[in-house]
Image (cartoon, helix red, strand yellow):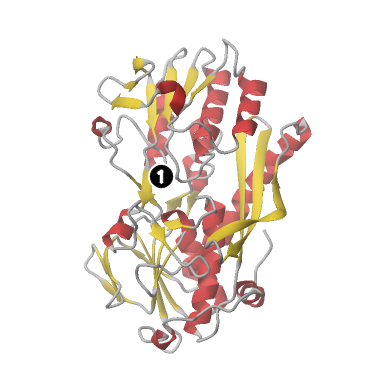
């Protein structure tokens, strides 16, 4: 990832294209001196990137980031923690880099947002006025009838990295050789579309080396998934997929007929086609929606996600509030870490311009996603996007980006793993400093 200085950042943010309206310019500076005050809700990839690039764009902006956790564990690379090849501490990011840039980091939970009064209220009893608010709450889970799953203490989701990741790793370590690990994959849309299948791959790799009689069963709530050809190709090359000795079994929604129940009490999953099956470890990844504060603040639509102006990420529900990352409707960008990082830069550039009373340009967006399927076996997808005003979508630019070939050489697959590790280090540095 190239180094971004203030001049290049502002040039990128004010990319050539149609000039947009600049609403709320009269509000600039009303809460934070002459340069203005920005309050950011959430310290994940989208929120932290926005905070950092606001300071790069205008170091005089008063930027406050409110986050309940003292540090952040990345969802990306958490599957390597489950595999045992990476420690949980190696996906933990601190906020020290943001603090060194002058971002005020407040450890607290936001309980409500008064969009009309331009105030953010926290569970700790504090109130923060703002000129612009950025809401980056990530995802929460929908209640879908599988109430027996309860608090995820026995059946984990491990889809918000941290303690859940550690719990699932311990369950896999304690599982006997010859046991079966079940992943219940979520319906679309959800955070990190290739994630469940990378998880299956790396757990299978752990089993192959340490518990060779064990098996991974994926009970999917879809009939196809991201990078499906590359994953199934990897499973054939590495884990005997499609044979009687396969370590991985994938079941589509059509093949199971749907899930009837999931029980943490007796560790079973019941489907129409296979009845009630007992597993040694179940990882249930629920259907998802925008983080709860988005709904509380009236930022969500009927589907539970946040519609936004795709060039500024300003909410279509409340002026002066921007929503980005997993919580936003940023069609056709995936809900990925790199997409959130890209959106954070676009949002920051727009806010810097708006607070200065300048016009906002039409941005470009990027996404790159690496997946690791086993030892020295990786692949990736990359895309460049541009806003399509006619369709109101962030559309992929034809010929820009690409996908690792299905017949890639062993050397190319090995290099993809190295690129993935470099990508991880770069995006973390670019996000949290």
SS of the residue under disc 1 = loop
| Residue 139 drawn above or below residue 184 | below
In the rendered image, the vertical position of residue 163 relative to residue 356, given as above or below? above
Residue 112 position within the rendered picture, expressed as x and y whole percent measured from the top left: 26, 65
User: From this viewpoint, is residue 219 visible?
Assistant: no
Residue that lies at the very extreme toward the left in this rendered image? 125
Left or right of 300? Residue 429 is right
Q: How many marks on residues?
A: 1
Point 40% across, 38% down: residue: 158
Question: Picture quarter containing residue 13?
Answer: bottom right
Tell me if residue 89 comes above or below residue 82 in the rendering. Answer: below
Q: Is residue 363 above or below residue 301?
A: below
Image quarter of residue 376: top right
Quadrant location, the N terminus: bottom right
Nearer to the camera, 409 or 391: 391
Left or right, 216 with reference to 305: right
Q: Where does residue 11 sit, x and y in percent of width and height?
A: 65, 76
Instruction: In this rendered view, identify the residue nearer to me: 269 or 52.
Output: 269
Residue drawn at 52 percent across, 63 percent down:
392
- Please, which residue is most extreme toward the top here? 244
Could you tell me which residue is drawn at 38 percent across and 38 percent down? Answer: 164
Give the x, y percent position of residue 238.
Answer: 64, 22
Residue 152 horizontal side relative to residue 177, left or right: left
Q: Label 1 crowding class (10 Å Cα cut-off): few <14, some 14-19, many 20+?
A: some
Q: Which residue is mark 1?
A: 160
Whether residue 251 is visible, yes or no, is yes
Q: Residue furthest front?
A: 390
The quadrant in which the C terminus is found is: bottom right
Residue at 42% x, 32% y: name it: 221
């Amino acid at each position: 990832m190239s180094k971004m200085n203030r001049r290049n950042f502002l040039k990128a943010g004010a990319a050539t294209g149609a000039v947009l309206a600049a609403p709320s310019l009269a509000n600039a500076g009303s809460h934070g001196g002459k340069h203005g005050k920005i309050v950011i809700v959430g310290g994940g990839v989208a929120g932290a990137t926005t905070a950092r690039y606001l300071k790069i764009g205008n170091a005089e902006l008063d930027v406050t980031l409110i986050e309940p956790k003292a540090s952040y564990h990345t969802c990306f690379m958490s599957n390597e923690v489950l595999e045992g090849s990476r420690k949980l501490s190696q996906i933990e990011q601190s906020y020290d880099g943001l603090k060194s840039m002058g971002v005020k980091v407040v450890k607290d939970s936001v309980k409500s947002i008064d969009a009309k009064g331009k105030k953010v209220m926290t569970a700790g009893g504090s109130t923060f006025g703002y000129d612009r608010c950025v809401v980056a709450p990530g995802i929460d889970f929908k209640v879908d009838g599988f109430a027996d799953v309860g608090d995820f203490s026995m059946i984990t989701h491990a889809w918000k990295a941290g303690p859940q990741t550690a719990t699932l790793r311990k369950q896999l370590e304690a599982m006997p050789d010859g046991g079966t690990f079940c992943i219940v994959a979520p319906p679309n849309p959800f955070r990190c579309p290739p994630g469940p299948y990378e998880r299956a791959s790396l757990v299978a790799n752990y089993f192959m080396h340490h518990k060779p009689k064990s098996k991974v069963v994926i009970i999917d709530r879809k009939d196809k998934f991201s990078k499906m050809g590359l994953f199934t190709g990897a499973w054939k090359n590495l884990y005997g997929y499609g044979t009687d000795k396969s370590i991985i079994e994938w079941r589509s929604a059509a093949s199971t007929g749907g899930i009837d129940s999931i029980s943490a009490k007796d560790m079973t999953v019941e489907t129409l086609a296979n009845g009630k099956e007992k597993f040694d470890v179940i990882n249930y990844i629920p259907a998802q929606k925008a983080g709860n504060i988005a709904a509380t603040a009236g930022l969500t639509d009927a589907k539970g996600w946040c519609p936004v102006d795709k060039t500024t990420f300003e909410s279509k529900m409340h002026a002066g509030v921007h929503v980005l990352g997993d919580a936003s409707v940023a069609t056709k960008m995936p809900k990925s870490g790199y997409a959130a990082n890209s959106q954070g830069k676009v949002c920051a550039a727009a806010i810097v311009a708006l607070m200065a009373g300048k016009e906002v340009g039409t941005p470009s967006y990027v996404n790159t996603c690496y997946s690791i399927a086993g030892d020295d076996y990786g692949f990736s997808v990359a895309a460049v996007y541009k806003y399509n005003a006619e369709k109101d979508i962030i559309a992929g630019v034809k010929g820009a980006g690409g996908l690792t070939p299905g017949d890639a050489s062993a050397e190319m697959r090995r290099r993809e793993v190295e690129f993935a590790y470099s990508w991880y280090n770069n995006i973390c540095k670019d996000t949290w400093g």
